[in-house]
Image: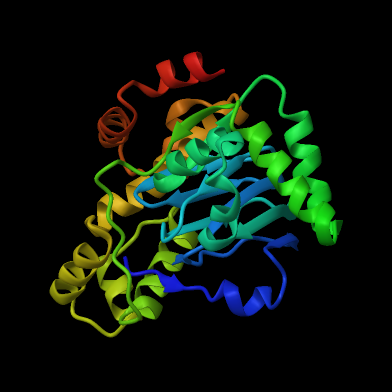
Amino acid sequence: MKPLLEDIGKKRGEDAFLAFEIQANKLEFFWHYHPEYELTLIVEGKGSRLIGDDHANFESGDLVLIGPGLPHTWVSDHRRKEKCKAIVIQFSVEFIERFTGLSEMSTIHQLLLSAKQGISMNGNDLTLVNQLIQSLPSQKGFQKVTQLLQLLAEMSSLKTTSLASPFYQALKGSENEKRINKVCQFIQKHATETLSIHTAAALIYLTPSAFCKFFKRMTGKTFSDYANDIRIANVCNELLATDKQIAEIAYANGFETLTYFNRIFLMKKNRQPSQYRKVAS
């Protein structure tokens, strides 16, 4: 899908970079990109995140660094009533390159290179990193800059997991972004129901055949495959968070038959649902 360009430079004004807190009843689907790096820490909330072509669940403690130009969005689980809180830090290539050319900053340089396709942070103890992130929005002047550098240095020692696939290339542009965002919001909201191509096509005034071509061109996936990505992510969340029967979870998340569900789950997760629950728990 073609993402919206977010003008962070205009928001930043004369500040060196942005560090701010988001509090909301829910995070809405907003597929966008910008030329800045972005670090996002989820303090409270659960849902799913889409980074390039990577779709995964998020919960409190989720920490992701994305590189310039990589489309992304975080979406709350609409079935949950809990509020969301996140800390977001956005800094430009021009700003950070003032420091990464120094030999002392080589580990930070490598961290930023690895963020090209997006990375999630892993580690046994993220306490210091989380403290630095959560206090950064209140910092001013010189202390704000030095704390960001300290934060990046601490993060460079963490284990990371790459997100978007190496061959992923973003489709950027302004044409049709409102239409594809409208359709993707519809899928997110109604993923637990029977989804009809006719209904989705009518949202943007296309015939079903024209809609299928449009959706595949914009997202690189068929309508049903994209919907199944959303559903499987929701299923994985329930497999780990509840003791419900697998069949009950499958039917509650929009799968009409258990045979079809098992086939799709195996294809997307390379294991059976019972194995996924056992290994991940």
**x, y (%) of residue 102?**
57, 42
Q: In which quadrant is the C terminus drawn? A: top right
Q: Nearer the viewer, residue 98 or 20?
A: 98
Write the residue at 66% across / 56% down. Answer: 89
Give the image quarter of residue 223: bottom left
Q: Nearer the viewer, residue 16 or 3?
A: 16
| Residue 44 visible, this orientation | no
User: Against 138, is 256 above or below?
Assistant: above
Write the residue at 20% across / 62% down. Answer: 216
Q: Which of 192 and 15 is in front in this view?
A: 15
User: Against 85, is 177 above or below?
Assistant: below
**x, y (%) of residue 69?**
41, 61
Q: Is residue 5 left or right of residue 197?
A: right
User: Against 196, is 125 above or below?
Assistant: above
| Residue 170 visible, this orientation | yes
**x, y (%) of residue 153?**
65, 35
Write the residue at 49% across / 20% down. Answer: 277
Give the image quarter of residue 123: top right
Q: In which quadrant is the N terminus drawn? A: bottom left
Give the image quarter of residue 133: top right
**x, y (%) of residue 58?**
57, 42
What colour scheme has been applied to the protein in the rendered image?
rainbow
Q: Which of 139 and 252 is in front in this view?
A: 139
Q: In this view, does 200 lie to the left or right of 43?
A: left
Q: In this view, does 109 lie to the left or right of 251?
A: right
What is the tally of numbered marks visible in this picture?
A: 0
Q: Is residue 195 left or right of residue 131?
A: left
User: Against 37, is 243 above or below?
Assistant: above
Write the residue at 74% across / 61% down. Answer: 20
